[in-house]
Image (spheres, rainbow, N blue to C red):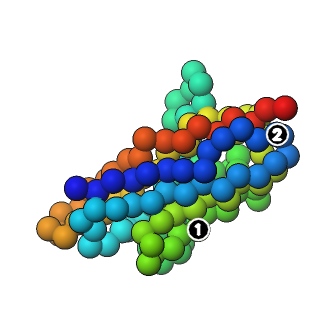
Amino acid sequence: QVQLVESGGGLVQPGGSLRLSCAASGRIFSINRMGWYRQAPGEQRELVGTITSTGSINYADSVKGRFTISRDNGKNTMYLQMNSLKPGDTAVYSCNAVVTGRNYNTMTYWGKGTLVTVSS
């Protein structure tokens, strides 16, 4: 089994910054693409951005220039640095990962999410 755990959420004022982490653990052979998603109250989940195992990154237009995705393959961890936060960024942020397990099966796993609230 593989588990993804997000951390780093909280309350921040508009214009502030937060750094989220997504740590993968379990019977992992390799992690391929990882992604951050968010779901605001009453809205559908949307993609924030993705990063491949080789470091290729894509961002949603709404966060380009403000958010930065990175990963530490040695720690099986992905990060989301969020700067210049706006009230519209308030959401539950979740991560997913396409993981090849030690049985060589490939599956997509999701974390439970961490709440980010941007408010004065």
The answer to which image quadrant residue 115 occupies is top right
Quadrant containing the N terminus in the rendered view: bottom left
- What amino acid is found at the position of numbered circle 2 in the picture? Gln
Q: Nearer the viewer, residue 21 or 95?
A: 21
Residue on which disc 2 sits: 13
Indicate the secondary structure of the residue bearing disc 2.
loop
| Residue at point 71%, 52% (across, down) | 18
Q: Residue at x 42, y 69 (%)?
A: 76
Choose between 63 and 77: the one closer to the eye.
Answer: 77
Left or right of 101 on screen, residue 47: right
| Quarter containing the C terminus | top right
Name the residue at 49% across, 57% down: 22
Q: At label 1, which amino acid type do we have?
A: Ser
Depth check: 48 or 119 in front? 119
Which disc, if any, is residue 70? 1
Residue 30 location in percent, x, y?
31, 72
